[in-house]
Amino acid sequence: MKEAKGNKVKQLKSKELGTEEIQWDLSVFYDGLDDPQLDRDIQMYTEQCKVFSTSFRGNLDTKLGDALIVYRELRELSAKIFVYLFLRLSVDVNDEEAKTKQDEAEITLSEVEGEYLTFFALEIIDLSEDVLQKQIESSDVVAHHQPYLEDIRKEKPYVLSEEVETIVTQTSPFRSSSWSSFYEEILADLRFHFQDKEMSLIEILNIVSESPHAKVRAEALRVVNGVLQKNFSKLSAQTLNMVVGQKRFFDKKRGYTHPMQTRNIGNKISDEIVRALHSSVEEKAAPLMRRFYKLKGAHLGIKPMSWSDRNAPMPFSDSTKTPYGDALEMVINAYSGFSPTLADIIQDMVSNHRIDAHVTSSRMDGAFSYSMVLPDSKTTSLVFLNYLGSNRDIMTLAHELGHSAHGMLAGRAQGLLMQHTGMVVAETASVFGEMTTFNAIKNKLTKNGNTQALLALIMGKLDDIINTSVRQVSFSFFEQEVHNAGKRLSPKELCEIWMKQTKRLYGEDGDVFSYKDTDSLWSYVGHFHRPFYVYAYSFGELLTHSLYAQQERLGEKFEPLYIDMLSAGDSKSVSELLKPFDLDPSNPAFWDNGIAVSIEALLNEAEQLSREMGVTIPV
C-alpha cells in the first residue's frame, strides 16, 4: 500500500512538537504480545469461568455476594486481556500479530462466556424480591451492587431462554460486530486521488475542514463524495442493512416496542427524556446554528456556503502550533483552578506514562480515553491522542483527560461492574474539562484585547458544540428513519433519507448551504453500525453546559457535588445524578437552557465581536 505523503508531514510535526516520547507504558498489562502471561491469563479465564459456573449455578439465592466478588474478578481479568490488545492495535492498526491475537481471544472467550456465564444474569432476574432483599440486608457486597442488580432485572421482559442467550453470546463475534469490523477495514483502505496525491479518507477530510481556500475545500469534497458514491456506498449500504436487520430480528424476538428502546434502557433514561432532547435541538438549537453559519459565511465572504465550508477556519484563525508540554501545562493549570482533586489524578497519569500522543502513519485516527479496573482492583486510565498542536488539539487533550478523571473516580468508588456510565453521562467530565480549559484561554485573550484571536477561538468552539449537539441529532433522525423503514434500503434510498434529514435541521438548499456533493456522505459514518449511539453526544454536550452553568449559583458547594457525581459511575440514573444540582432532564426547559448557555451565549459574543470588526451581521 502506498504511504500517503501527508502522514510524513504529520510525523515531522509531531517530532517538533515534543510528542516523540509521549507514549504509553503498557507494562501494567503485559510486557508484549509474546509475554507468556497473556496466554496464561486467557487459559486462566477459561478455567475460572468453569469453576464459577460449578460453584454458583443454582445457588444465587444464598451465595449472591460471593458470586459477585468472583464475577467482578473475572471481568477484571477479561478487561486486562482485551484492553491491552485494543491499545496495541490503536497505535499500529496494521499489526497482524495483534489482530490475530485479538480475534482468537474474542472467539475463545465468547464461547466460554456463553457456556459458563450466561446463567448469571438470568438467575439474577429470576430471584424473588424477598430473596434479593434478604441478601441486600445481609451482604455489604450485594448492597453495594444493588444498582447493578436492578439494571439486570429491568431486562426481565426482554430476555430469551438460557439456551438461546448462550447461542447469542457465543455467536457474537460473527454477527453485526463482524460486519462493522469489515466495514471499518474497507473504509480505512479507501484512497482518494487529489492534487496528484493518493490520500486516505482522514487526510482528505482534513483538507475539507482545514484548507483556507474555498475552491480547494469544494474540490476535495467532490472527490470524497464521488469515491464514496462509486466505490463504497454499495458496500456501506449492505453492512448497514445487515446491522439494522439483525437488530430488528432480535428486537422483535425480545419484545422491544421501538428501535431506540434498548439503547434508552441501557442509558438509564426514559423515551420522554430522549424526545425532549431531540425536540429542543430541532426547535431551539437548529435556528441558532443556521444563524451562526450565516455569520461564518459573512466572515468568509461566501453566500450561500458550500457544505465544504461548514468547518472552514476563520480567515484570521490562529495557526500557531503549541508544543505538547505547554499544552499539558495549560490544561493541568485549568483543571487545578477548578478542582485540585481532578488535577492530581491527571498529574498521576502523566507520571505513569498513561498518555500516547505521537502521530505515526500506522496509528488509529482520533482520540479516546479508556479507564478500567484491573485484577487486584488496580484502577488505571489511558489516553490516546493524535497531537498536532492546534487549539482544537489542546481542547481534545482536556476532553480526554476529563474522561480519564471520571473513570478513575468511578472505578475507585464503584468497582468494575459499576464503573462505566451510560454514554449519555460519559461525556460529562470530558466536555466539562474542555470548557474549563476553553474559558481559561478565552479569559487570557480577553485580557490581552486580541479581538481577532478571541473571535477565532469562539467560532471554533461553536463549530465543535454544533457538530456535537446538532449534527449528531441530525444523524439520529437519519438512523430513526432507516430503522423504522422495516425493509432493506438501497444506496439511493439511503442517500434520499440522508438529504431529507440534513435539510430538516440545516435548511433547504440555498438557505444557508448548497448541498452539492453531499448525498453519499452517510456512508462513512461508522457510528451507524452501533445503533442509536449518536444522540448520546448531543445529550452529554448540552447536559454538561447546563451543569457547568450552575457553578456561579452553587459557589463552593459545586466542586464536591461534582466529584460525587463523577464518583457515582453507573450506580445512578441521569435524573438521580442531576437531582443535587436541582436539574431535571425530563423538562424541555433543561435542554433549552443548555442550548442558551452554550450556543446562544457564544453566538451573541461572536456577533458582538464581529460588529467591532465591522462585519455586517446577516439577518
Image: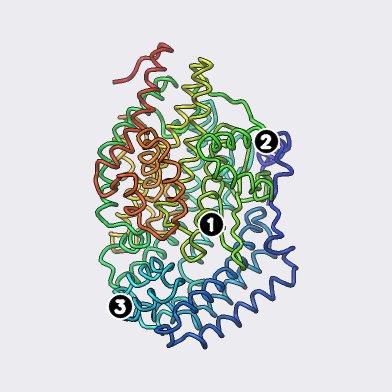
Q: Residue 440 in the image: x percent, y percent?
A: 52, 29
Give the numbered dot on residue 219: none
- Specify whether 375 is left or right of 308: right
Alpha-carbon span between mark 1 and mark 3: 45 Å
Residue at the disc numbered 1: 184
Q: Is residue 523 above or below residue 553?
A: below
The amino acid type found where label 3 is placed reads: Glu
Q: Nearer the viewer, mark 1 or mark 3?
A: 3
Q: Is residue 615 above or below residue 489?
A: above
Q: Nearer the viewer, mark 2 or mark 1?
A: 2
Q: Residue 56 in the image: x percent, y percent?
A: 48, 85
Q: Residue 335 in the image: x percent, y percent?
A: 54, 38
Check if mark 1's residue and mark 3's residue have beta carbons within 8 Å: no
Kindly give the residue lying farthest to the front in the view shown: 138
Q: Nearer the viewer, mark 3 or mark 2?
A: 3
- Specify whether 171 is left or right of 552: right
Image quadrant assignment for residue 160: bottom left
Check if mark 2's residue and mark 1's residue have beta carbons within 8 Å: no
Q: Which residue lies at the image location 51% right of the left edge and 75% below the top edge?
A: 71
The amino acid type found where label 1 is placed reads: Glu
Is residue 385 visible in this depiction of the protein?
Answer: yes
Foreground residue among 45 and 257: 45
Q: Which residue lies at the image location 59% right of the left edge and 47% below the top edge?
A: 345
Residue at the disc numbered 2: 325
Secondary structure of the residue carrying numbered label 2: helix
The amino acid type found where label 2 is placed reads: Gly
Residue at the disc numbered 3: 129
Secondary structure of the residue carrying numbered label 3: helix
Is the residue marked by circle 2 packed among few (<14), some (14-19), or many (20+) residues within 10 Å?
Answer: few
Foreground residue among 562 and 471: 562
